[in-house]
Image (cartoon, rainbow, N blue to C red):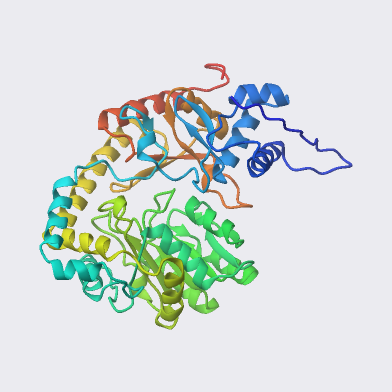
Amino acid sequence: MTIMNIVLVPNTSEHKSDPIYRQVADAIAQQIDSGQLQAGSKLPTHRALADQLAVTVGTVTRAYAEAERRGLIEARIGAGTYVCQANQPSWVYNYSEQEEEECNFGYNIPPRLDRSDMLKQAMANIAAHPEQLNQMMLYQDPQGLTEHRDIVCNWLQQKGFELDPQRVHFTSGGQHAAQLVLAAFCRSGDTVLVEHVSYPGFLSLARQQQISIKPVEMDEEGLIPASLEAACRLYQPRIIYSTPTLQNPTTVTMGEQRRQDILAICQQHQVLFVEDDVNGLLPTERPTPMVNIDSEQVIHIGGLSKCLAPGLRLGYIQVPTRLQKRLNAALHNHSLMISPLLTGIACELIISGDADRILHQIRTDITQRQQLVAQHLGRFDIQHSPHSFHVWLTLPDYWLLSDFVQAANQQGVVVKSGELFSPPGSTIPPAIRLAISAPYTHRKLEQGLLILSELLEKDPIHDFTL
């Protein structure tokens, strides 16, 4: 275990210092930057560091949560807290680190399915046409092969997404698409508006590019129009980033009228709306995609990771016509192109019907998992949806957020604190996200839900001592 030398500065009437938890997180960051803490180093336990610094365990828990939000460290179930590998933020999932019996609700990943036979068949179909295969091995336009874009867009159009194959660009997943948006259409110092709890991957990208993030209040339908309009007047943002369908982490889905109202504000203030619709294919019924309503005001991001296979790393992005050249240049600068072999495999899976079969299996599995959630956590304050990979659980008043995350971890259950999803300056909600799709089996999922249910029933002050 690594011993950390941390000097805290008290907050006095003469000297205003940062909160203690932030000082600890800053010290961890500084020691990682200086090389004092190496990747893979194990940090002290919450209690050991609390005793060393003469602070509460809750303060250390919050400090570790802040460091995890910054992508500096990660908690590993049953093993402790470790410094992340370079450039590997803590919200990135590594299958090899999860044991089959581990109860990890941390990562929003599709359920494990056997895709081997369909992938073998798809690759065999490609290999059966040597001329086309050789063509795929050449440099291509950054936008992707025309026939591949036609196949993917036709499939998406059948599911209600009005995407134009002449305007769609392939990307290396939804995260890459978000990175391209910031690289192509924002500059250092620009302001971007996001939901008051938002996807950590986007927050990390914005921080990396020195872009200012400002949170906008939400209700049960997502972004509140009045709050958005006030934020547009105050901050004059470059873009607005939102997940209108099965929002991460709250599972909220914007209704039809709310989508219209939000886009009207965007038009009024001449600001682009980035629709991150990576979950958009999961529901069997959904409101009209925002790109359908106004394709010249909306940047649409989607992908096949949630509904087909994360390992394909295939996403897509459509921007307003006037921005096509800028996006094309940004993609070329980032990666020249997306591998035609991967887009070809995806197209074979679509043509064969295997993509639809996988999507149906995922929907069925998630519906069953959400039924288990309702059975075991339904009496608590939860937000969930039949086809959502995750659940947003607001804690009872008697639980502190940091204490609950620690208590769950001590009982072998990993959850994600609401702090991880909170933009700078945002109020941290007393809530946790449960990625119910992550446990390998329904049995393990149910075991974790039972543990959480028992914890939620307990008043930590009167029922036991942490």
Is 409 displayed left or right of 373 in the figure?
A: right
Q: Position of residue 218 (x, y in %)?
A: 50, 56
Quadrant the N terminus occupies: top right
Q: Residue furthest right?
A: 14
Instruction: Give the quarter of the image for residue 344.
Output: bottom left
Of 72 and 164, which appears nearest the observer? 72
Instruction: Give the quarter of the image for residue 128.
Output: bottom left
Q: Where is 371 relative to 411, above or below? A: below
Q: Position of residue 156 (x, y in %)?
A: 24, 66
Is 396 displayed left or right of 49 in the figure?
A: left
Is 169 displayed left or right of 462 in the figure?
A: left
Of 260 and 304, which appears nearest the observer? 304
Can residue 157 be seen? no
Quadrant the C terminus occupies: top right
The number of numbered discs placed on residues in the rendered structure image is 0
Residue shown at the point (52%, 78%) measured from the top left: 268
Q: Where is 347 relative to 71, above or below? A: below
